[in-house]
Amino acid sequence: MLTTRVSLSLALALALAGLLPACSAAAQPSTLSAATEPAAPHPPAEPPPYPIFRLGGFGDLEFHSSSEDRPGGLDVAEIDLYSTAQLTDRLSALVEVLARRDHRDRLVTEVDLERLFVAYAPSDFVCIEAGQTHTGIVQWNDREHRSRLLQTPIDVPAIARPPQDDGAWPLRFVGVWVSGRVEGPLGLKYGVAAGYGSGKRRDEIPVVSGDRSPAGLLSLSIAPPRWHGLELGIARYVQRIPATAEPLRERDLTLSLSYVNRGAEVRAEYARMMHVGIHSGRRFRSVGYYVLLSQRLNGRLSPLRPYFLFDRLDLARGEEYLRESRNEDAVAGGMRWDITSHFTLKAEGRSQRGKKRDHDLIVGLQLGVSF
Amino acid sequence: MALLTAILVALAAISAPAGGEHRLAVIVGRTDALSDISRDDLRLIYIGGLTRLGGRRISPVVLEEKAPAQRYFLKNVVGMGEIDFTQAWIGAVFNGEVATPPHLARSPAEACRYVATHRNTIAYVDAADVEGDVKAVKVDGKAVDAPDYPLVWR
Protein backbone atom coordinates (compact mmCIF):
# COMPACT_ATOMS: atom_id res chain seq x y z
CA MET A 1 0.00 0.00 0.00
CA LEU A 2 1.35 3.34 -0.96
CA THR A 3 0.38 6.42 0.99
CA THR A 4 1.50 9.83 -0.09
CA ARG A 5 0.64 12.87 1.97
CA VAL A 6 1.71 16.46 1.65
CA SER A 7 0.62 18.77 4.42
CA LEU A 8 -1.36 21.77 3.25
CA SER A 9 0.54 23.98 5.61
CA LEU A 10 3.68 22.98 3.82
CA ALA A 11 2.95 25.54 1.16
CA LEU A 12 3.07 28.25 3.77
CA ALA A 13 6.29 26.87 5.15
CA LEU A 14 7.92 26.76 1.77
CA ALA A 15 6.79 30.28 1.10
CA LEU A 16 8.39 31.41 4.33
CA ALA A 17 11.49 29.41 3.56
CA GLY A 18 11.68 31.29 0.32
CA LEU A 19 11.77 34.48 2.30
CA LEU A 20 14.78 33.25 4.21
CA PRO A 21 17.44 33.71 1.56
CA ALA A 22 20.07 31.02 1.33
CA CYS A 23 22.92 33.45 1.43
CA SER A 24 26.50 32.38 1.65
CA ALA A 25 26.41 32.55 5.42
CA ALA A 26 23.58 30.08 5.33
CA ALA A 27 25.77 27.23 4.23
CA GLN A 28 26.91 25.28 7.23
CA PRO A 29 30.00 23.34 6.33
CA SER A 30 30.96 23.25 9.96
CA THR A 31 29.01 23.75 13.13
CA LEU A 32 31.55 26.24 14.26
CA SER A 33 31.72 29.13 11.86
CA ALA A 34 35.20 29.98 10.73
CA ALA A 35 36.71 33.44 10.60
CA THR A 36 35.99 35.34 7.46
CA GLU A 37 37.10 38.85 8.17
CA PRO A 38 40.61 39.97 7.45
CA ALA A 39 42.66 41.09 10.40
CA ALA A 40 42.90 44.79 11.07
CA PRO A 41 45.13 46.38 13.66
CA HIS A 42 42.64 48.67 15.36
CA PRO A 43 39.32 48.58 13.54
CA PRO A 44 36.26 49.96 15.30
CA ALA A 45 34.15 47.40 17.09
CA GLU A 46 31.20 46.44 14.91
CA PRO A 47 27.73 45.53 16.11
CA PRO A 48 26.48 42.06 15.10
CA PRO A 49 25.28 41.99 11.50
CA TYR A 50 21.56 41.34 11.34
CA PRO A 51 19.77 39.62 9.82
CA ILE A 52 21.61 36.30 10.09
CA PHE A 53 20.26 33.45 8.00
CA ARG A 54 21.12 29.81 8.27
CA LEU A 55 20.01 26.82 6.24
CA GLY A 56 20.75 23.34 7.53
CA GLY A 57 19.45 19.85 7.60
CA PHE A 58 19.73 16.25 8.59
CA GLY A 59 19.47 13.09 6.61
CA ASP A 60 19.38 9.49 7.65
CA LEU A 61 18.98 6.01 6.29
CA GLU A 62 17.91 2.98 8.30
CA PHE A 63 18.37 -0.66 7.46
CA HIS A 64 16.74 -3.44 9.46
CA SER A 65 16.70 -7.20 9.52
CA SER A 66 13.91 -8.76 11.55
CA SER A 67 13.22 -12.24 12.89
CA GLU A 68 9.61 -11.81 11.86
CA ASP A 69 8.68 -12.58 8.29
CA ARG A 70 8.76 -9.07 6.97
CA PRO A 71 11.25 -7.92 4.38
CA GLY A 72 14.55 -6.52 5.58
CA GLY A 73 16.64 -3.88 3.89
CA LEU A 74 16.13 -0.16 3.66
CA ASP A 75 13.26 0.76 5.94
CA VAL A 76 13.35 4.49 6.54
CA ALA A 77 14.89 7.40 4.71
CA GLU A 78 14.44 10.93 6.00
CA ILE A 79 15.62 14.35 5.11
CA ASP A 80 14.91 17.16 7.52
CA LEU A 81 15.52 20.71 6.32
CA TYR A 82 15.38 23.80 8.47
CA SER A 83 16.06 27.45 8.09
CA THR A 84 16.57 30.01 10.83
CA ALA A 85 16.62 33.76 10.60
CA GLN A 86 17.86 36.05 13.36
CA LEU A 87 16.12 39.18 12.18
CA THR A 88 17.14 41.49 15.02
CA ASP A 89 18.79 41.08 18.38
CA ARG A 90 15.46 39.90 19.76
CA LEU A 91 13.42 38.63 16.83
CA SER A 92 13.98 35.34 15.02
CA ALA A 93 12.10 32.82 12.90
CA LEU A 94 12.43 29.12 12.15
CA VAL A 95 10.89 26.77 9.64
CA GLU A 96 11.43 23.01 9.47
CA VAL A 97 10.17 20.60 6.85
CA LEU A 98 10.52 16.82 6.94
CA ALA A 99 10.42 14.48 3.96
CA ARG A 100 10.20 10.82 4.84
CA ARG A 101 9.88 7.43 3.20
CA ASP A 102 9.00 4.56 5.51
CA HIS A 103 8.79 0.95 4.38
CA ARG A 104 8.50 -0.86 7.70
CA ASP A 105 4.86 -1.86 7.75
CA ARG A 106 3.59 -0.22 4.60
CA LEU A 107 5.17 2.16 2.15
CA VAL A 108 4.58 5.71 3.27
CA THR A 109 5.97 8.78 1.58
CA GLU A 110 5.21 12.09 3.18
CA VAL A 111 6.36 15.67 3.30
CA ASP A 112 5.33 17.48 6.41
CA LEU A 113 5.72 20.78 8.17
CA GLU A 114 7.32 20.14 11.53
CA ARG A 115 7.77 23.64 12.90
CA LEU A 116 7.08 27.16 11.78
CA PHE A 117 7.34 29.95 14.31
CA VAL A 118 8.45 33.45 15.05
CA ALA A 119 10.24 34.07 18.34
CA TYR A 120 10.72 37.24 20.35
CA ALA A 121 13.38 36.92 23.06
CA PRO A 122 14.19 40.15 24.89
CA SER A 123 16.18 38.19 27.48
CA ASP A 124 17.02 34.68 28.60
CA PHE A 125 14.21 35.03 31.12
CA VAL A 126 11.49 35.25 28.53
CA CYS A 127 11.14 33.99 24.98
CA ILE A 128 7.80 34.15 23.19
CA GLU A 129 7.22 31.85 20.24
CA ALA A 130 4.15 31.95 18.05
CA GLY A 131 3.33 29.43 15.36
CA GLN A 132 3.55 25.68 15.01
CA THR A 133 6.03 24.10 17.39
CA HIS A 134 6.36 21.19 19.80
CA THR A 135 4.21 20.83 22.85
CA GLY A 136 7.14 20.06 25.12
CA ILE A 137 5.19 17.35 26.91
CA VAL A 138 7.86 14.79 26.02
CA GLN A 139 11.37 16.01 26.62
CA TRP A 140 12.94 13.63 24.12
CA ASN A 141 10.87 15.08 21.34
CA ASP A 142 11.29 18.62 22.53
CA ARG A 143 15.03 18.29 22.57
CA GLU A 144 15.76 16.06 19.61
CA HIS A 145 12.89 16.83 17.29
CA ARG A 146 13.22 14.51 14.34
CA SER A 147 16.95 14.50 13.89
CA ARG A 148 18.33 11.00 14.30
CA LEU A 149 21.87 12.33 14.33
CA LEU A 150 21.30 14.15 17.60
CA GLN A 151 19.84 11.18 19.43
CA THR A 152 22.05 8.37 20.66
CA PRO A 153 20.02 5.25 19.71
CA ILE A 154 18.50 4.40 16.36
CA ASP A 155 14.88 4.44 17.42
CA VAL A 156 12.80 7.05 19.15
CA PRO A 157 11.27 5.88 22.44
CA ALA A 158 7.62 4.94 22.09
CA ILE A 159 6.29 7.96 24.00
CA ALA A 160 8.24 10.28 21.69
CA ARG A 161 6.99 8.82 18.41
CA PRO A 162 5.16 11.41 16.34
CA PRO A 163 1.52 10.73 15.44
CA GLN A 164 2.40 10.05 11.81
CA ASP A 165 4.63 7.24 13.08
CA ASP A 166 1.84 5.71 15.19
CA GLY A 167 2.83 7.67 18.27
CA ALA A 168 0.25 8.37 20.97
CA TRP A 169 1.39 11.55 22.67
CA PRO A 170 0.48 15.00 21.32
CA LEU A 171 3.86 16.33 20.27
CA ARG A 172 2.96 19.31 18.12
CA PHE A 173 0.60 22.17 18.49
CA VAL A 174 -0.18 25.60 17.09
CA GLY A 175 -0.23 28.53 19.43
CA VAL A 176 1.90 30.70 21.66
CA TRP A 177 4.72 29.39 23.83
CA VAL A 178 6.47 31.42 26.51
CA SER A 179 9.62 30.00 28.03
CA GLY A 180 12.72 31.13 29.83
CA ARG A 181 15.42 30.57 32.38
CA VAL A 182 15.43 32.10 35.85
CA GLU A 183 18.84 33.02 37.20
CA GLY A 184 19.68 31.39 40.48
CA PRO A 185 21.17 28.33 42.13
CA LEU A 186 18.39 26.06 40.85
CA GLY A 187 18.77 26.86 37.17
CA LEU A 188 14.99 26.98 36.91
CA LYS A 189 13.45 26.84 33.45
CA TYR A 190 9.78 27.21 32.67
CA GLY A 191 7.44 26.90 29.74
CA VAL A 192 3.82 27.97 29.36
CA ALA A 193 1.88 27.37 26.18
CA ALA A 194 -1.64 27.85 24.91
CA GLY A 195 -3.07 26.96 21.53
CA TYR A 196 -4.54 24.08 19.62
CA GLY A 197 -3.45 20.45 19.58
CA SER A 198 -4.32 17.42 17.51
CA GLY A 199 -7.90 17.20 16.28
CA LYS A 200 -9.98 14.22 15.18
CA ARG A 201 -6.96 12.96 13.32
CA ARG A 202 -3.96 12.86 15.55
CA ASP A 203 -1.56 13.89 12.81
CA GLU A 204 -3.41 17.10 11.97
CA ILE A 205 -3.89 20.31 13.92
CA PRO A 206 -7.02 22.17 12.78
CA VAL A 207 -6.91 25.86 13.65
CA VAL A 208 -9.77 27.32 11.63
CA SER A 209 -12.39 24.56 11.49
CA GLY A 210 -14.81 23.52 14.19
CA ASP A 211 -12.59 20.55 15.02
CA ARG A 212 -10.19 22.74 16.95
CA SER A 213 -8.70 21.18 20.02
CA PRO A 214 -7.79 23.78 22.69
CA ALA A 215 -4.62 22.84 24.52
CA GLY A 216 -2.33 24.19 27.21
CA LEU A 217 1.01 23.22 28.70
CA LEU A 218 3.01 24.06 31.80
CA SER A 219 6.52 22.76 32.24
CA LEU A 220 9.16 23.33 34.90
CA SER A 221 12.67 22.01 35.18
CA ILE A 222 15.73 22.60 37.26
CA ALA A 223 19.35 22.28 36.19
CA PRO A 224 21.45 23.36 39.18
CA PRO A 225 24.77 24.73 37.92
CA ARG A 226 26.44 23.07 40.90
CA TRP A 227 25.58 19.66 39.42
CA HIS A 228 26.75 20.03 35.87
CA GLY A 229 24.63 18.19 33.39
CA LEU A 230 21.76 17.23 35.68
CA GLU A 231 18.23 18.30 34.78
CA LEU A 232 14.94 17.29 36.40
CA GLY A 233 11.66 18.26 34.84
CA ILE A 234 7.90 17.99 35.13
CA ALA A 235 5.33 18.88 32.50
CA ARG A 236 1.55 19.00 32.46
CA TYR A 237 -0.51 19.12 29.29
CA VAL A 238 -4.26 19.52 28.95
CA GLN A 239 -6.38 19.35 25.83
CA ARG A 240 -9.95 18.91 24.66
CA ILE A 241 -10.17 16.57 21.70
CA PRO A 242 -13.19 16.49 19.36
CA ALA A 243 -12.75 12.74 18.81
CA THR A 244 -15.16 10.96 16.49
CA ALA A 245 -16.71 8.64 19.07
CA GLU A 246 -17.09 11.34 21.71
CA PRO A 247 -15.13 14.41 22.82
CA LEU A 248 -12.25 13.61 25.13
CA ARG A 249 -10.57 15.54 27.87
CA GLU A 250 -6.85 14.83 27.90
CA ARG A 251 -4.61 15.24 30.96
CA ASP A 252 -0.94 14.34 30.56
CA LEU A 253 1.85 14.31 33.08
CA THR A 254 5.52 13.76 32.36
CA LEU A 255 8.51 13.45 34.68
CA SER A 256 11.97 13.58 33.21
CA LEU A 257 15.55 13.21 34.32
CA SER A 258 18.71 13.68 32.35
CA TYR A 259 22.37 13.71 33.22
CA VAL A 260 24.85 14.55 30.50
CA ASN A 261 28.39 15.21 31.63
CA ARG A 262 31.91 14.09 30.71
CA GLY A 263 30.67 11.62 28.13
CA ALA A 264 28.02 10.03 30.34
CA GLU A 265 24.43 10.21 29.16
CA VAL A 266 21.49 9.14 31.30
CA ARG A 267 17.99 10.01 30.19
CA ALA A 268 14.79 8.75 31.71
CA GLU A 269 11.24 9.84 31.29
CA TYR A 270 7.90 8.69 32.61
CA ALA A 271 4.72 9.80 30.89
CA ARG A 272 1.08 9.26 31.76
CA MET A 273 -1.74 10.17 29.44
CA MET A 274 -5.34 10.21 30.65
CA HIS A 275 -8.30 10.46 28.29
CA VAL A 276 -11.74 10.93 29.78
CA GLY A 277 -14.90 10.77 27.70
CA ILE A 278 -16.75 14.03 28.27
CA HIS A 279 -20.19 12.44 27.89
CA SER A 280 -19.64 8.90 29.11
CA GLY A 281 -17.00 9.58 31.74
CA ARG A 282 -15.00 6.57 30.49
CA ARG A 283 -11.37 6.78 31.44
CA PHE A 284 -8.43 5.58 29.38
CA ARG A 285 -5.02 5.58 31.00
CA SER A 286 -1.84 5.07 28.99
CA VAL A 287 1.60 4.94 30.54
CA GLY A 288 5.05 4.87 28.99
CA TYR A 289 8.62 5.27 30.05
CA TYR A 290 12.16 4.82 28.80
CA VAL A 291 15.65 4.76 30.24
CA LEU A 292 18.70 5.47 28.11
CA LEU A 293 22.21 4.77 29.41
CA SER A 294 25.32 5.53 27.42
CA GLN A 295 28.93 6.47 27.89
CA ARG A 296 31.35 7.90 25.38
CA LEU A 297 34.63 6.01 25.42
CA ASN A 298 37.92 7.71 26.13
CA GLY A 299 41.05 8.45 24.18
CA ARG A 300 41.28 7.06 20.68
CA LEU A 301 37.95 5.34 21.16
CA SER A 302 36.18 8.62 21.89
CA PRO A 303 34.17 8.48 18.61
CA LEU A 304 32.42 5.41 20.06
CA ARG A 305 29.45 5.52 22.37
CA PRO A 306 27.87 2.23 23.53
CA TYR A 307 24.32 2.49 24.77
CA PHE A 308 21.31 0.68 26.18
CA LEU A 309 17.69 1.69 25.82
CA PHE A 310 14.75 0.30 27.78
CA ASP A 311 11.48 1.34 26.26
CA ARG A 312 7.96 0.58 27.43
CA LEU A 313 4.50 1.74 26.48
CA ASP A 314 1.17 0.37 27.71
CA LEU A 315 -1.75 1.92 25.92
CA ALA A 316 -5.23 2.04 27.35
CA ARG A 317 -7.23 -0.92 26.14
CA GLY A 318 -10.12 -0.30 23.85
CA GLU A 319 -9.47 3.35 23.20
CA GLU A 320 -10.63 4.19 19.72
CA TYR A 321 -8.67 7.44 19.47
CA LEU A 322 -5.36 5.60 19.88
CA ARG A 323 -6.21 2.59 17.74
CA GLU A 324 -3.33 3.26 15.33
CA SER A 325 -0.78 3.39 18.12
CA ARG A 326 0.99 0.31 19.37
CA ASN A 327 2.33 -0.94 22.66
CA GLU A 328 6.04 -1.27 23.19
CA ASP A 329 8.24 -3.47 25.32
CA ALA A 330 11.75 -3.22 23.98
CA VAL A 331 15.34 -3.51 25.04
CA ALA A 332 18.02 -2.26 22.69
CA GLY A 333 21.78 -2.23 22.89
CA GLY A 334 24.09 -0.73 20.36
CA MET A 335 27.09 1.27 19.42
CA ARG A 336 27.16 4.75 18.00
CA TRP A 337 30.21 5.70 15.98
CA ASP A 338 30.69 9.39 15.33
CA ILE A 339 32.89 9.25 12.27
CA THR A 340 32.84 13.03 12.40
CA SER A 341 30.68 15.44 14.36
CA HIS A 342 28.40 15.57 11.32
CA PHE A 343 28.37 11.94 10.22
CA THR A 344 27.31 9.04 12.41
CA LEU A 345 26.92 5.30 12.00
CA LYS A 346 24.89 3.29 14.53
CA ALA A 347 24.54 -0.46 14.88
CA GLU A 348 21.91 -1.86 17.19
CA GLY A 349 20.34 -5.08 18.35
CA ARG A 350 16.81 -4.78 19.61
CA SER A 351 14.30 -7.12 21.17
CA GLN A 352 10.76 -5.81 21.05
CA ARG A 353 7.19 -6.95 21.24
CA GLY A 354 6.38 -8.37 17.83
CA LYS A 355 3.14 -8.50 15.93
CA LYS A 356 3.29 -12.28 15.61
CA ARG A 357 5.76 -13.29 18.30
CA ASP A 358 6.30 -12.29 21.87
CA HIS A 359 9.67 -10.90 20.99
CA ASP A 360 10.91 -9.80 17.62
CA LEU A 361 14.68 -9.63 17.25
CA ILE A 362 15.83 -6.79 15.06
CA VAL A 363 19.27 -5.85 13.89
CA GLY A 364 19.46 -2.29 12.66
CA LEU A 365 21.95 0.00 11.02
CA GLN A 366 21.54 3.74 10.68
CA LEU A 367 23.51 6.38 8.85
CA GLY A 368 22.97 9.94 9.99
CA VAL A 369 24.37 13.15 8.62
CA SER A 370 23.96 16.85 9.30
CA PHE A 371 24.77 19.58 6.81
CA MET B 1 78.14 33.80 49.05
CA ALA B 2 77.91 30.69 46.94
CA LEU B 3 75.73 29.08 49.57
CA LEU B 4 73.42 32.12 49.64
CA THR B 5 73.16 32.05 45.86
CA ALA B 6 72.30 28.39 45.91
CA ILE B 7 69.58 28.97 48.53
CA LEU B 8 68.09 31.84 46.53
CA VAL B 9 68.10 29.78 43.36
CA ALA B 10 66.40 26.92 45.19
CA LEU B 11 63.78 29.23 46.66
CA ALA B 12 63.16 30.78 43.27
CA ALA B 13 62.66 27.33 41.79
CA ILE B 14 60.14 26.47 44.50
CA SER B 15 58.18 29.71 44.34
CA ALA B 16 58.11 30.07 40.57
CA PRO B 17 55.24 28.48 38.63
CA ALA B 18 55.92 24.84 38.05
CA GLY B 19 57.26 24.00 34.66
CA GLY B 20 54.49 23.58 32.07
CA GLU B 21 51.79 25.34 34.06
CA HIS B 22 49.23 27.12 31.89
CA ARG B 23 46.45 29.46 32.83
CA LEU B 24 43.32 29.78 30.77
CA ALA B 25 42.51 33.45 30.33
CA VAL B 26 38.90 34.35 29.61
CA ILE B 27 39.03 37.42 27.41
CA VAL B 28 36.67 40.17 26.25
CA GLY B 29 37.26 43.43 24.44
CA ARG B 30 39.32 45.93 26.39
CA THR B 31 36.42 48.37 26.62
CA ASP B 32 33.87 45.71 27.52
CA ALA B 33 32.09 46.34 30.82
CA LEU B 34 32.45 42.71 31.86
CA SER B 35 35.16 42.27 34.49
CA ASP B 36 34.20 39.08 36.32
CA ILE B 37 32.38 35.92 35.31
CA SER B 38 31.50 32.73 37.14
CA ARG B 39 32.46 29.33 35.82
CA ASP B 40 28.79 28.40 35.80
CA ASP B 41 27.90 31.34 33.57
CA LEU B 42 30.89 30.59 31.37
CA ARG B 43 29.71 27.03 30.95
CA LEU B 44 26.17 28.14 30.22
CA ILE B 45 27.38 30.57 27.55
CA TYR B 46 29.29 27.77 25.88
CA ILE B 47 26.39 25.35 25.82
CA GLY B 48 23.95 27.93 24.50
CA GLY B 49 22.01 28.25 27.74
CA LEU B 50 22.98 31.84 28.45
CA THR B 51 22.84 34.25 25.55
CA ARG B 52 22.96 37.56 27.38
CA LEU B 53 25.11 39.11 30.08
CA GLY B 54 24.07 42.41 31.59
CA GLY B 55 21.28 42.67 29.06
CA ARG B 56 23.63 42.43 26.09
CA ARG B 57 23.81 39.45 23.76
CA ILE B 58 27.10 37.64 24.20
CA SER B 59 28.69 35.58 21.44
CA PRO B 60 31.23 32.88 22.28
CA VAL B 61 34.41 32.15 20.37
CA VAL B 62 36.13 28.76 20.42
CA LEU B 63 39.55 27.50 19.38
CA GLU B 64 40.41 24.63 17.12
CA GLU B 65 40.05 21.15 18.53
CA LYS B 66 43.79 20.51 18.66
CA ALA B 67 44.53 23.59 20.77
CA PRO B 68 45.44 22.55 24.35
CA ALA B 69 43.37 25.43 25.71
CA GLN B 70 40.35 24.13 23.80
CA ARG B 71 40.77 20.60 25.12
CA TYR B 72 41.20 21.87 28.67
CA PHE B 73 38.20 24.17 28.42
CA LEU B 74 35.83 21.57 27.03
CA LYS B 75 36.85 18.92 29.53
CA ASN B 76 37.03 21.05 32.66
CA VAL B 77 34.54 23.85 32.11
CA VAL B 78 31.95 22.53 29.68
CA GLY B 79 32.24 18.85 30.64
CA MET B 80 32.05 17.56 27.08
CA GLY B 81 34.32 16.20 24.40
CA GLU B 82 34.67 17.89 21.04
CA ILE B 83 32.11 15.66 19.27
CA ASP B 84 29.42 16.13 21.91
CA PHE B 85 30.14 19.84 22.08
CA THR B 86 29.76 20.32 18.33
CA GLN B 87 26.60 18.24 18.23
CA ALA B 88 25.13 20.14 21.16
CA TRP B 89 25.52 23.32 19.15
CA ILE B 90 24.01 21.73 16.05
CA GLY B 91 21.04 20.96 18.26
CA ALA B 92 20.91 24.43 19.78
CA VAL B 93 20.76 26.07 16.35
CA PHE B 94 18.28 23.47 15.10
CA ASN B 95 16.04 24.09 18.10
CA GLY B 96 16.10 27.81 17.49
CA GLU B 97 17.75 28.48 20.86
CA VAL B 98 20.65 30.37 19.29
CA ALA B 99 21.13 32.00 15.92
CA THR B 100 24.63 30.78 15.22
CA PRO B 101 27.18 28.41 16.68
CA PRO B 102 30.33 29.82 18.28
CA HIS B 103 32.82 31.54 16.05
CA LEU B 104 35.81 29.31 15.36
CA ALA B 105 39.19 31.02 15.72
CA ARG B 106 42.05 29.23 14.00
CA SER B 107 44.62 30.42 16.51
CA PRO B 108 44.84 32.21 19.87
CA ALA B 109 45.99 35.33 18.05
CA GLU B 110 42.92 35.22 15.87
CA ALA B 111 40.69 34.72 18.92
CA CYS B 112 42.20 37.84 20.52
CA ARG B 113 41.82 39.79 17.30
CA TYR B 114 38.21 38.73 16.85
CA VAL B 115 37.25 39.61 20.41
CA ALA B 116 39.05 42.95 20.12
CA THR B 117 37.13 43.86 16.99
CA HIS B 118 33.67 42.53 17.80
CA ARG B 119 31.50 43.83 20.57
CA ASN B 120 29.96 41.45 23.08
CA THR B 121 32.16 38.49 22.29
CA ILE B 122 34.04 36.27 24.69
CA ALA B 123 36.87 33.81 24.21
CA TYR B 124 39.50 31.87 26.10
CA VAL B 125 43.18 31.44 25.34
CA ASP B 126 46.32 30.44 27.18
CA ALA B 127 47.22 33.48 29.30
CA ALA B 128 50.61 33.54 27.60
CA ASP B 129 48.86 34.14 24.27
CA VAL B 130 46.79 37.16 25.31
CA GLU B 131 47.54 40.07 23.00
CA GLY B 132 45.98 43.17 21.51
CA ASP B 133 42.98 45.19 22.70
CA VAL B 134 41.53 42.56 24.98
CA LYS B 135 41.49 42.00 28.70
CA ALA B 136 41.39 38.90 30.85
CA VAL B 137 38.36 38.93 33.13
CA LYS B 138 38.28 37.46 36.59
CA VAL B 139 36.79 33.99 36.94
CA ASP B 140 34.84 33.39 40.15
CA GLY B 141 36.39 36.59 41.46
CA LYS B 142 39.97 35.44 40.84
CA ALA B 143 42.35 37.31 38.57
CA VAL B 144 44.23 35.24 36.03
CA ASP B 145 47.50 35.70 37.90
CA ALA B 146 46.04 34.91 41.31
CA PRO B 147 47.51 31.86 43.07
CA ASP B 148 44.07 30.28 43.42
CA TYR B 149 42.88 31.04 39.89
CA PRO B 150 40.56 28.14 39.00
CA LEU B 151 41.49 27.52 35.35
CA VAL B 152 45.02 26.14 35.49
CA TRP B 153 46.52 23.10 33.81
CA ARG B 154 49.94 21.58 33.28
Image: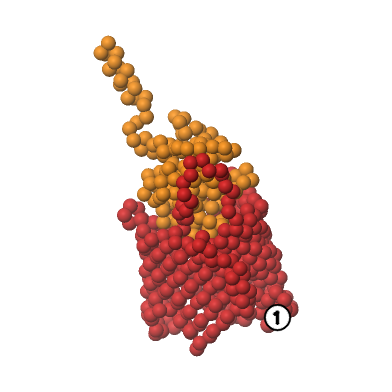
Chain colours: A red, B orange
Q: Secondary structure at mark 1?
A: loop
Residue matched to label 1:
A246
Q: Residue at x 56, y 51 (%)?
A: B49
Residue A246 to residue A20: above or below: below
Task: Give, as a three-letter code, the residue at label 1.
Answer: Glu
Residue B16 to residue B39: above or below: above
Q: Measuring from the top left, give residue B37's x and y in whole percent.
A: 54, 39
Quadrant of the rendering where the C terminus of chain B is positioned: top left
Q: Residue at x 31, y 54 (%)?
A: A300
**Residue A74 can be seen, yes or no:** yes
Residue lying furthest bottom in this view? A1
Most foreground residue, A208 or A242: A208
Q: Label 1 marks which chain's residue?
A: A
B142 vs A250, left or right, is left
A256 vs B126, left or right, is right
Query: Quick one: label 1, few (<14), some, or many (20+) residues within 10 Å?
Result: some
Q: Residue at x 48, y 79 (%)?
A: A101
**Residue B45 can be seen, yes or no:** no
Most foreground residue, B99 or B41: B99
Q: Measuring from the top left, give residue B81's x and y in whole percent.
A: 41, 52
A363 vs A197, left or right, is left
In which image quadrant can residue A314 be found? bottom right
Q: Measuring from the top left, give residue A276's x and y in whole percent.
A: 68, 73
Most foreground residue, A166 or B94: B94
Q: How many marks do you count on the picture?
A: 1
Q: Residue at x 54, y 52 (%)?
A: B48
